[in-house]
Every structure is written in structure tokens, then in C-alpha cells.
Image (cartoon, helix red, strand yellow):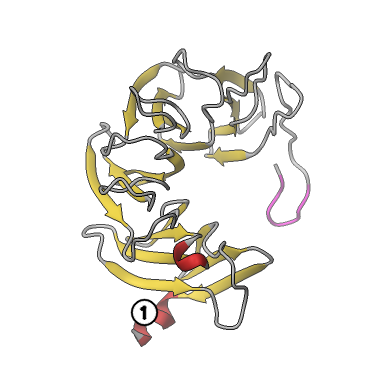
Amino acid sequence: MFDPATGALLERLENPDAHADDSFGETVVGTDDWIAVGLDSGDNGPGLQRGRVDLFETRTGAHVRTIRSPTADRSFISFGKAVAISGDLLFVGAPNMRVGTASRAGMVFVYDIVSGTLLRSMDSAFDSRAESFGRTLKSVNYGLLVGSSFSHPSGDTVGAVFLYGSDGTRLRTFEDPDPAHGDFFGFSIDTVGDAILVGAPEANGRGAAYLLDSSTGALLHAFRRPPGSLTFGGFGLQVAALGDDVVIADPGITSRLRIRDLRDAG
């Protein structure tokens, strides 16, 4: 942990159960009270890459507990690929987990962050293989956004984003405004005010990011890679809000686009 004003190192969180190729710190989310570190390829045993989440106290940096997949299916399930915290709830994505007969369909597990007790699990509405449900998670004040970058009602690998209420009820599905096979819509998610920003890094072979109305799912603006730049996919690999602007990551380039100016311009 670093001081944002000075850049000074404040605390170093150590891997409490280190194995080769753990990738400790691959996914990190924090609040004033908790820091959750996911390592989806870690916790290796013979022939295993199960993944886990380590929980730390923010104030002291002390390791509180390790959370592992509650299911028997623990090999290469990417448990901990995404993590999110909302109040006393910890959400953990396992996008490669089998659901019924659907391989790599994905699940999200919800824990009481204080006790570590598993409260419930969630899976996709589409019940098909290789959906990567739980690939990305974003906690919002009205629920949880779950990215499922291979999901689509038609069964094609377009991608979708699901909104869940605090009780685990599915409230809404956000779909790709310009759907095509392999768009990876939902690969990255953030919120900008009352809108949702979703990355689709393979859309049209180049990538895109879409600003959607959180109430209706209506498209507010489509962001594309600037003309004359790279001709392969990746634009929208990561997205983030920065005040009234958005930051859209691209291989070798980071594009900062003003939402307010673009929306006013139509």
C-alpha cells in the first residue's frame, strides 16, 4: 500500500501461503476496513490451479483468513479471478467453474466478510458452456454488476453484464449494443455517475467501450479506438471512470476521452 499524496510505501502485504506461480496480487480490491487479494491461478497442488482469496485488515495489514472454493470442482476454475466488496459482503468470481453439465460456465460466491461464511452463489441466466460468468465484478450502491464475457441469449460468445440486487435477485441484463461473435462484451466494467461503462475489447476486431443507462440499458455513447491507430483488438481491455472522463486501456496506448464533451456533441 502506498500514500497517494507522496508515493511513500505504507504497508506490504505478503502471500500467506506461497506456491510457485501464485500470481499473488493479480486482483485487489479494498475498503476502509478490508483488502481482498485474489489469485485465480494460485494455491497450487499436484496438477491443480485452484485459486483463492486472501483477506487482510486495511488498518494493520494483518492477514485475517484465506477463502477457497466451496465446491469439489477446484482445478483450473479461476476462483478469485474477480473480487468485490460491498459493506459486509465479499463477492468472488470463478469464471471457469462447471455449472451442471456446462463446463466453464462460471459462478459468483457471496460471503459474509466478517465471519467468512458462504451465504449464497449465483450463476448465469443462459445456462450454457464457456460463459465466463464472474470474469469481472463491480460493486455499486444499487447492487452488483457481473461481467460474463462469453454469455449471450442466443448462445453465441458475445458477452453480457448482469445486475443483481443485494439479496442475489437478478434485476437486469445489459447486452452488447452491436453484438458479434467474440466481442468479449463485459470483459471490463465501471460506473460513471448513473451510467455503466462496459469494455468489449474484441468488438469489430479492434475493440470498443459502451456507456449504458443503468436503468434501461440504453446506449448513451460508443467509444471506438481513435482513427489511424492500431488495427487489432484490445481497445476496452480495461475501463475506468475519472470524474467526468473515462479512461480506456489499449495495448500500448491509454486513451482518455471526455464523456461530457462527447455526449453534448451527440
Compared to residue 218, the image places residue 81 above or below, namely: above
**158 vs 85, nearest the viewer:** 158
Residue 174 seen by the camera: yes
Q: Position of residue 136 (x, y in %)?
A: 46, 44
**41 vs 152, nearest the viewer:** 152
Compared to residue 228, the image places residue 139 above or below, namely: above
User: In the image, which residues are magenta?
Assistant: 2-8
Which residue is painted at 54% across and 36% down in the image?
81
Compared to residue 120, the image places residue 159 above or below, namely: below
Classify 10 Å Cα crowding around label 1: few (below 14), some (14-19), many (20 and above).
few
Which residue is painted at 27% across and 39% down in the image?
126
Amino acid residing under circle 1: Arg
Q: Position of residue 95 (x, y in %)?
A: 46, 35
> Is label 1 in a helix, a strand or a loop?
helix
Q: Position of residue 21 (x, y in %)?
A: 74, 29
Q: Position of residue 114 (x, y in %)?
A: 46, 21
Location of the C terminus (image quadrant)? bottom left
Which residue is painted at 70% across and 28% down in the image?
22
- Where is mark 1, residue-wise? 263
